Image (tube, rainbow, N blue to C red):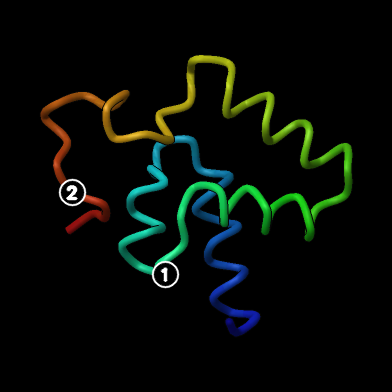
Amino acid sequence: MTQQETDRIFEMNWEDRTPFEAIAFQFGLTEQDVIALMCSELKRSSFHLWRKRLNNGISKKHVHKRNTGINRFKSK
């Protein structure tokens, strides 16, 4: 994986509305792969902040949590 791809994955992960399924579609990484990548690349405190945001109920990182009217991964 190139540095540019890794950077894009990080951008997508910090964006609460980008689902893990979009990352899997574009980069072939499962949710567990993404979590492992974030854990290995981020400082411990940054990783914990990200996980806290992910699990707080506001994040829409899973397609089933999104509004059913949204059926695309990227804007037009």
User: Residue at left 50%, top 43%?
Assistant: 15
Q: Please tell me in which quadrant of the rendered image residue 40 appears.
A: bottom right
Q: Which mark is residue 12?
A: none
Crowding around mark 1 (Cα neighbors within 10 Å: few <14, some 14 to 19, many 20+) is some
Q: Would you name the residue on which mark 2 appears?
A: 72
Q: Quadrant of the C terminus?
A: bottom left
User: Residue at left 27%, top 27%?
Assistant: 64
User: Residue 7's spot in the image, x, y percent?
Assistant: 61, 68
Q: Amino acid at mark 2?
A: Arg
User: Residue 59's spot in the image, x, y percent?
Assistant: 48, 26
Q: Is residue 6 above or below residue 70?
A: below
Q: Which residue occupies the extreme bottom position in the image?
A: 2
Q: Nearer the viewer, residue 67 or 39?
A: 39
Q: Is residue 22 above or below residue 49?
A: below
Q: Which SS class for mark 2?
A: loop
Q: Which SS class for mark 1?
A: helix
Q: Which residue occupies the extreme right position in the image?
A: 44
User: Residue at left 69%, top 53%?
Assistant: 38
Whether residue 55 sits left or right of residue 17 in the image: it is right
Q: Please tell me in which quadrant of the rendered image residue 37 appears.
A: bottom right
Whether residue 49 sits left or right of residue 68 in the image: it is right
Q: Amino acid at mark 1?
A: Phe
What separation in Å lies between label 2 and label 1 (alpha carbons)?
Answer: 16 Å
Q: Is residue 37 above or below residue 52?
A: below
User: Residue 47's spot in the image, x, y percent?
Assistant: 77, 41
Q: Nearer the viewer, residue 23 or 73?
A: 23
Crowding around mark 2 (Cα neighbors within 10 Å: few <14, some 14 to 19, many 20+) is few
The nearer-to-camera label among 2 and 1 is 1
Q: Would you name the residue on which mark 1 appears?
A: 27
